[in-house]
Image (tube, rainbow, N blue to C red):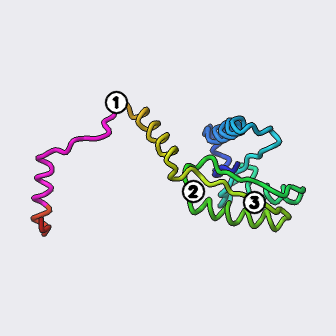
Amino acid sequence: MSFHGVPERTLHLGDPYHCECMKTARLLAQALQLPPEGYRITFQSRFGKAKWLEPATEPTLVSMAQSGVRKVDVICPGFTSDCLETLEEIQQEAKVAFVQAGGEGFNYIPCLNTRADWIGAMTALCMRHLQGWPTQTPPDAQALQTQKQLALAGGAKH
């Protein structure tokens, strides 16, 4: 399970991100009935000179391949949709590193992306947490008329 990395100092300053990643991984492993030795938690996307959360994803995968692990499944549970950065770092670069180090099978498990069940769940979460907030405001007739007049004055045709 690879989570996006952040500088380690954020952990020491009290940011709960690291703890939330650990909790997410534990709950996901529990739901998938994975034993503790059946998964590892890593962090990707390091840059700059600062010390980042560890262990790092790519070196961990290389070490696993070198120690005899031949097949891995990699998921990025901190993301709800695939992004180019993650696809490049994990699905491409980490895969190449794992295979070059002796691994044979690398399976990137895609994010939820636009799956209908995920969109429905996200909608339900948003609606529950937006209770009491106006989610739609009826258009103000006077404001619409003013905008139309400004657009016409600016050269709009209709």
Q: Which residue is mark 3?
A: 106
Q: Do tag 2 and tag 3 residues touch (Cβ < 8 Å)? A: no
Q: Nearer the viewer, mark 1 or mark 2?
A: 2
As drawn, 27 above or below 76? above
Identify residue type, mark 3.
Phe
Identify residue type, mark 1.
Gly
Upstream in sequence: badge 1 or badge 2: 2
- The one of 116 and 128 positioned closer to us in this rendering: 116
Q: Which residue is mark 2?
A: 82
- In the displayed structure, does residue 127 sit left or right of residue 43? left
Q: Which mark is residue 22?
A: none
- The one of 59 and 96 positioned closer to us in this rendering: 96
The residue depicted at 77 percent of the width and 65 percent of the height is 97
Q: Is residue 134 magenta?
A: yes
Q: Which residues are magenta?
A: 132-150
Mark 1: give few (<14), some (14-19) or many (20+) Cα within 10 Å. Answer: few
Identify residue type, mark 2.
Asp
Q: Which residue is mark 1?
A: 132
Q: Position of residue 13 (x, y in %)?
A: 63, 40
Separation of disc 1 and disc 2 at Cα? 32 Å
- In the displayed structure, does residue 7 sit left or right of residue 134? right
As drawn, 100 above or below 138? below
Mark 3: give few (<14), some (14-19) or many (20+) Cα within 10 Å. Answer: some
Upstream in sequence: badge 1 or badge 3: 3
Which image quarter is the C terminus in? bottom left
Q: Do tag 1 and tag 2 residues touch (Cβ < 8 Å)? A: no
